[in-house]
Image: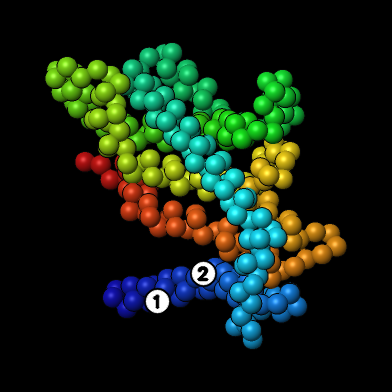
Amino acid sequence: MKSRRCVGKIIFELCMLALSGIILIPLLMLIFGSFKDAAAAARFTIDLPEEWHLENYIYVFTSGKLGRATFNSFIYSVFGVSVCTICAMLCAFIMERRSSRVTEGVYMYINVGMVAPLMVIPTLAFLKALHIYGTYFSVILVFAGMYIPWSVFLFTSFMKNVPRELDEAAFIDGCRPIRLFFTVVMPLLKPIIATNIVFIAMNIWNDMMIPLYMVNSPEKTPVSLSVYQFYGSYFRDWNLVFADLVIASLPMIVLYFYLQKYIVGGLTVGAVKG
């Protein structure tokens, strides 16, 4: 029995090692390629550069206007996540604590938004009718509308594990509903808030379709579209593409590692109960 477990463990570890290699090889190629010249980067090898071209990063920031694009992505991500998270938390709190046929109907209607595709042409027509097409606000509004259904589902599922006895104790002490939410319930939502922030921020940061249709000015272009300055039908500067992708990935990597301890709790809530 012990030998079988040992063999199974070895096979599992070998599979994980192979999977790690599959993930690491493109990552190393990306990092090393960002320091090579154009010809060496185009060979897509994972060897160390013969000469380290730090000027690739300088060129991407200056000529590629990556600094401005990164700032735009921060604007879209921070405000999109904030609007989505706050609205979803309040909505989930009301639907979970005041369960009725109306709230159940609203919850089902919101859940439809998780599977319904985005209608680009009607959305563009609507934004143009409001005279906000091409603005920061319009892009943030679309992103928030896309991810609120997912966030409501996530927060509602999590709040089922928050004891209602806390509400009753707070009401006895004279706590109003809005204060109850922000002082009692919200601090308990840290794991799921972190999970929601990382999930939505990564999706907004990496999204290419919405900015492609909703942004009509180079000054509002996010980092997800900046790579096309170095990649086209007739030219491909792979060293600059790699440098752009490395810089674009760093903020989300830092965010994930910073909130990692909360994310694990948010994803595993309710898995073990009793």
Report the side of 120 relative to 86 (left or right): right
Q: Is residue 253 visible?
A: yes
Q: Position of residue 257 (x, y in %)?
A: 40, 58
Q: Quadrant of residue 143?
A: top right
Q: Which circle marks residue 176 in the picture?
A: none
Return the residue nearer the eye: 180 or 109.
180
**Quadrant that contains the C terminus:** top left
Residue at the location (66% across, 42% down)?
220
SS for dot 2 = helix
Amino acid type assigned to the residue bearing label 1 in the image: Ile
Q: Which label was assigned to residue 19?
A: 2
Using the numbered discs, state the Cα–Cα distance from disc 2 to disc 1 in whole angstroms.
14 Å
Give 153 or 125, whichever is nearer the viewer.
Answer: 125
Q: Position of residue 68 (x, y in %)?
A: 62, 50
Q: Is residue 245 above or below residue 212?
A: below
Q: Earlier in the sequence, mark 2 or mark 1?
A: 1
Q: Is residue 257 above or below residue 274?
A: below
Q: Please identify the residue farthest to the front as the structure is shown.
A: 62
Q: Label 2: how many residues lie within 10 Å, few (<14), some (14-19) or many (20+)?
A: few
- Residue with the mark numbered 1: 10
Q: Residue at x 46, y 23 (%)?
A: 107
Viewed as shown, does residue 245 lie left or right of 273? Answer: right
Q: Position of residue 230 (x, y in %)?
A: 74, 61
Instruction: Tell me the quadrant of the picture where the N terminus can be found.
Output: bottom left
- Three-letter amino acid code at disc 2? Leu
Residue 67 image-quadrant placement: bottom right
Q: Secondary structure at mark 1?
A: helix
